[in-house]
Amino acid sequence: MKKLQYLEGLRGIAAVVVVFSHFVQMFYPALLTGYPEMAHHPFEGWLSKYPANLLYNGNFSVCLFFVLSGYVLSFKFFKYKDGEILFSGAVKRYVRLAVPVFASVCFAWALLQWDAYYYDDIRGITRSNMEDPYAGNAGFPHIIKLGFGDVFIHGDSDFNPVLWTMRYELVGSYIIFALLALFGHVKKRYIVYFLYAAIIAGLAVYIDLYYTAFILGLFLSDLHNNYGGFPRTSFFRFAVLLLFASGLFFGSFPYIYPVHTMYGYLLIPVPFVKNNAFVLYHIAGAFLLMWSVLNADSAKKALSRKLFRFLGKLSFSLYLTHFIILCSFSAFLFSCLVTHYSYHASFAATFFLSWTVMLPVSYVIYKYADSTAIRLGEAVYRTGFAKVYGRLFPGLTPTEAAHTLKGDDSP
């Protein structure tokens, strides 16, 4: 899928920001909370209130992941208009997610058996208020149940806190497939997108607002692939730049309560907005940023560079494993260094040396779990479900698109 290399690069950058956010959560928590008693430098409380927090705004990156998934999962359908793409995608999606998730849980569980976690030893020094995710233990049967079931059914994230997003990824994917199957050929399907997103927003207390990010990604995919981007008028560059700047501004909506910050005016006196501002503005920012990238050739070229594409390939495995390494290797290394060097010097060394572990581990998971999941999903569909599709729709001849274009690599 060469045309989507720039989206792979964008996903890679988003994954790195998530890693940064957890470094901050563990070592410089005042950057998230704004509490001076947690700070190691006065500059932390100041930085937490301004757009510079984009460097570690992990929730914004998660919303960008969801918008990307909505776009990528619908891309092939709009290109080939083949219902089998939706059917095969629905079958393969669970396998695509479950195999790497299970591998990450096994990795975390194995380190726990070796007593290799040290976060609890350093959180008194780092002043982090994050609970120790590895305070308990469980047998391997629980790990199997967790990795293949509870993560997706109940949203459990035992042994790996980042897994809270996996239920959204799975359910959000099926929302995309269902909408396309029911309305993908309807002429005025944009009305359906709007109504569905409005229903989710209206029931935000019961249905999580994050699901609207998938609908917005679907909308962008439809708009961009069927109707093109912005018309190339004299205002084209200004419009794209405005989208980009607005996306970054909304995406930098801070973790702290923003009433006394430059974001305070975004707290519109409407209960829905005030109660959901943190997620709402991050979703809006992800949507606008994605829209700008789709219309900016220079951004596509930059994001298609080898480094960003490499990070994009590793993005899912990096996302799944980095927190485990932070609580084990990084915490241990920091505990050794901080007794001999200053806090900031110890963190700097820990930060850079942690990447020498994170990237190789991510590559191993990518090669042996992530890539295997894609191949396994293809095999499961071809051997067990392709004939089912043929029987359900005997008048349709499956295109080669679902087989020659390997399954999407969106997390």
Image: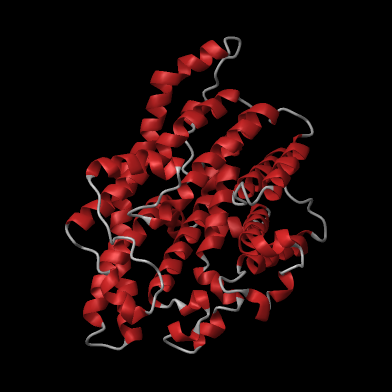
Q: Can residue 2 be seen in this view?
A: yes
Which residue occupies the foreground of this view, 271 or 395?
A: 271
Q: Residue at point 46% right, 62% down? A: 18
Q: Is 240 rendered above or below residue 205?
A: below
Which residue is painted at 49% across and 86% down in the image? 36
Q: Position of residue 342 (x, y in %)?
A: 30, 88
* Residue 83 picture quarter: top right
Going 61% across and 10% down the picture, which residue do you hit?
395
Residue 367 lies, in percent from the top left, at: 31, 45
Could you tell whether 394 is left or right of 146 in the image? Answer: right
Residue 242 drawn at (x, y percent): 73, 65
Horizontal side of residue 17 vs 115, given as left or right: right
| Image position of 97 with respect to 252: above or below | above
Residue 107: give x, y in percent of width and height.
26, 51
Asked if residue 143 is positioned above or below residue 137 in the image, the reply reads above
Q: How is the image coloured?
A: secondary structure
Residue 310 visible, this orientation: no
The residue most toward the right is: 234
Q: Is residue 340 left or right of residue 51?
A: left
- Residue at horizontal 40 percent and vertical 35 percent from the top: 95
Q: Is residue 73 left or right of residue 203?
A: left
